[in-house]
Amino acid sequence: MEKIAVASQKGGPGKTTTTVNLAAGLALAGYRVLVADIEPQAQAGIALGVRLAGTDIAKSLALPLQHLAQGVPSSLRSIIIDRSELLRSRKSKGTLHLLASEQATMTNAQHILHAAGVEKAHVLRDLLKELDDEYDFAVFDTPPAVQSLNGVALAASDYALTLCNPKGATVEGAVTMRSTIRHVKDRTGGAADPKYLGAVLNMAHPMGEWSTEEIDVRNQMVDANLQPFLTEIREDSRISGSYSKGMPAVIGYARTAPGKRYARFLQEVLDRMDTPEDEWEIAQSADEQLDAAEAAAVPAQQVKEASSV
């Protein structure tokens, strides 16, 4: 099982939609996929059609995390929720399972893990060992900021990616998260060493709609060596609407622009997992893209003028 954390130091750039669409895309491709919601707001579960309430909170991932942090043996098997029914319309042979979160229990887990310190950062990694042969991928939705739950997720990960949207503060957050990812090995005594995969630009716009801030964000992502993915995820009401429906856009809109973009993004993630960083193709800065568009427009105009003569 290869484990991927979707992480951001800032809230709001789109971690949950990225997590569930990446996971659902893998499942559509035929893989056995597990989503772990390590976020107190429990949004990954909601995005997959699951809300834990009442007696169902006993299925919260937070409880095994609490138990193991307190030295009590625990297991994940009894709380796994099968969401493979979401794949039926696409006739996929993959599976999509969920370890769901719930606010009160996960907040309590956060306090327990914070008090326990880095010595208990291994709890999720240890819990997942019993499932290692049962899944091809696990994808983690993590809370914003560098905190104990985030640390637990990164300490369980083999790979990690971050994201920005067209807001300048998200670039600063992505830079912080990239640094955090690269220090996991030291903080865990070598027990974990997730490979940084890059940053995806989420909620992006076509070139003709770029604001000054979006141009700056695109330039900063390159200048800060965030290794931006070639594929960007455009702002689209079909993606935001998919959240409330509990159906990831990569499934519900597989043949439209949102689904195709997530599919291309997934392929880039898989390619980067198997390729040295110095061989990655990265997105151009906004300035480079604008210059290229202007250069392409000049010959087109010349052709038009020549044909009119």
Image: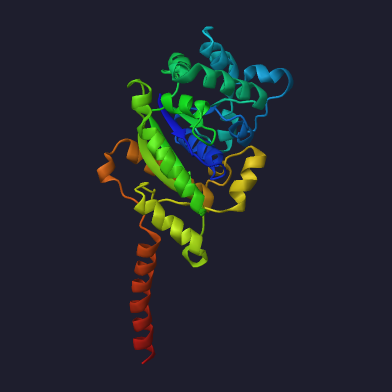
Say which of 10 and 65 sits in front.
Answer: 10
Which residue ends up furthest to the top in the rendered image? 72
Identify the residue at horizontal 30%, vertical 46% (top origin): 280
Say which of 114 and 136 sits in front.
Answer: 114
Above or below — where is 34 with respect to 264? above
Identify the residue at horizontal 52%, vertical 65% (top origin): 209
Percent from the top left, x then y, of residue 229? 39, 48
Figure quadrant of residue 291:
bottom left
| Quadrant of the drawing holding the C terminus | bottom left
Please state if 294 lies on the left or on the right of 93 as rendered. Answer: left
Percent from the top left, x then y, of residue 285? 37, 58
Say which of 53 and 111 sits in front.
Answer: 111
Identify the residue at horizontal 37%, vertical 72% (top origin): 294
Residue 136 seen anywhere in this rendered image of the structure? no
Above or below — where is 73 with respect to 200? above
Which residue ends up furthest to the right in the rendered image? 54
Say which of 20 and 253 sits in front.
Answer: 20
Identify the residue at horizontal 63%, vertical 32% (top origin): 41
Percent from the top left, x then y, of residue 276? 26, 39
Above or below — where is 122 with respect to 162? above
Percent from the top left, x then y, of residue 268? 38, 44
| Quadrant of the drawing holding the N terminus | top left
Residue 71 seen anywhere in this rendered image of the structure? yes
Figure quadrant of residue 274:
top left
